Image (cartoon, rainbow, N blue to C red):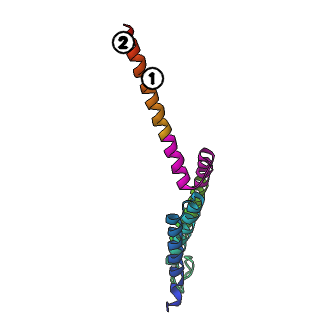
Amino acid sequence: MAEPGLYNYWIATFLMMTGFYVVISSGNLVKKIVGLNVFQASVFLFYISMGNVRGATAPIIIEGAVVAYSNPLPHVLILTAIVVGVATTALGLALVVRINEAYGSVEEDEIHQHEMRDEEEEIQREIKEAEEYLQRKIKKEKSE
């Protein structure tokens, strides 16, 4: 069994692998964003756990006392990362909404099929235009 102080690391590892699995296995773009958020939460937990020192206090200097202090830097970095994470999630969801409007789906497979159809239609249109151009050119040369 693990030591009592290591549970945070086991939970962070579990959350990290869960988020990674959701991102890799899911074809739904919203589920991928949720998986990224779970992964991100595991990183937050990991950094905050690293910044915790057992038996330490907040870094407030008291005259005459020799005390172990916890490093506040990981907590400050995580606060900034949370703000960036919320903004990134909002941007990702806005892109998913726009993709849904353009393709009518948030599933990767359906989006790729739609893109392939668009490419095939574009190729067919270009071939038709090239054939029409060649026919016009041939008619022009024959008339001259």
Mark 1–mark 2 distance (CA, rounded to whole Å): 14 Å
Q: Where is 117 relative to 48, above or below?
A: above
Q: Is residue 71 left or right of residue 98?
A: left
Q: Residue at x 52, y 87 (%)?
A: 5
Counting residues from the start of the chain, the first of labels 1 and 2 encountered is 1
Q: Residue at x 39, y 21 (%)?
A: 134
Specify whether residue 100 is painted magenta.
Answer: yes
Mark 2 belongs to which amino acid? Answer: Glu
Range of the magenta residues? 92-119
Q: Where is 80 relative to 13, above or below?
A: above
Nearer-the-camera pick, 106 or 120:
120
**Mark number, residue 132:** 1
In the picture as drawn, the residue positioned furthest to the bottom comes out as 1
Horizontal and vertical percent position of residue 47: 50, 73
Horizontal and vertical percent position of residue 61: 55, 77
Q: Where is 1 relative to 84, above or below?
A: below
Nearer-the-camera pick, 19 or 57:
19
Nearer-the-camera pick, 53 or 105:
105
Nearer-the-camera pick, 52 or 58:
52
**Where is mark 2, residue-wise?**
141
What is the secondary structure assignment of the residue under circle 2? Answer: helix
Label 2 environment density (alpha carbons within 10 Å; few <14, some 14–19, many ≥20): few
Horizontal and vertical percent position of residue 108: 53, 55
Mark 1 belongs to which amino acid? Answer: Glu
Horizontal and vertical percent position of residue 51: 51, 76
Q: Main secondary structure of the magenta part?
A: helix
Look at the image and tell me in which quarter the C terminus lies: top left
What is the secondary structure assignment of the residue under circle 1? Answer: helix
Q: Is residue 87 left or right of residue 139?
A: right
Q: Residue at x 39, y 17 (%)?
A: 137
